[in-house]
Amino acid sequence: MALEMRDRCERCETAALPLDAPARICSYECTFCVPCSEAMRDVCPNCGGELVPRPRRS
């Protein structure tokens, strides 16, 4: 089962997140850019889970 690699931050919607860009995800694959994740103190606003670095694909 592969991760769903979303290409936009769910908070600001303006940050394009290519597959090789740094991003943060929770266990439900909610996706946020690094600045938004830091602003939310690495807590997902959808589920309350921890936001961690998303693996990168080339």
Image: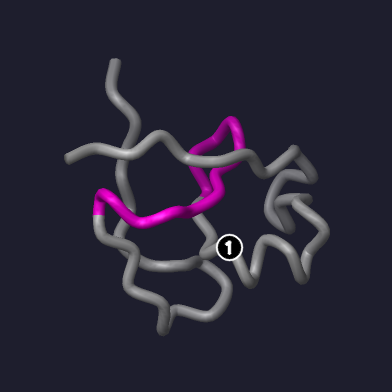
Instruction: Single out the residue that lies furthest toward the top.
Output: 1
Colour scheme of the picture = one colour
**x, y (%) of residue 58?**
17, 40
**x, y (%) of residue 33?**
52, 64
Instruction: Single out the residue that lies furthest toward the left.
Output: 58
The one nearer the camera, 28 or 18, is 18
Q: Image point 41% across, 77% down: which residue?
A: 15
Give the magenta-colored segment's residue range: 19-30
- Counting other residues with Cα less than 10 Å from the Cα at mark 1, is it few (<14), some (14-19), or many (20 or more)? many
Left or right of residue 11, residue 21 in this image: left
Figure quadrant of residue 50: top right
Secondary structure that dominates the magenta span: loop
| Residue beneath disc 1 | 34
Q: Is residue 12 above or below residue 6?
A: below
Q: Secondary structure at mark 1?
A: helix
Q: Image point 79% across, 45% down: which residue?
A: 48
Q: Is residue 24 above or below residue 52?
A: below
Q: Is residue 46 above or below residue 1?
A: below
Figure quadrant of residue 55: top left
Left or right of residue 11, residue 48 in this image: right
Q: Is residue 10 magenta?
A: no
**x, y (%) of residue 1?**
29, 15
Q: Amino acid at mark 1?
A: Val
**x, y (%) of residue 44?**
71, 51
Q: Is residue 12 above or below residue 34?
A: below
Q: Is residue 28 magenta?
A: yes
Q: Image point 33% across, 39% down: which residue?
A: 56
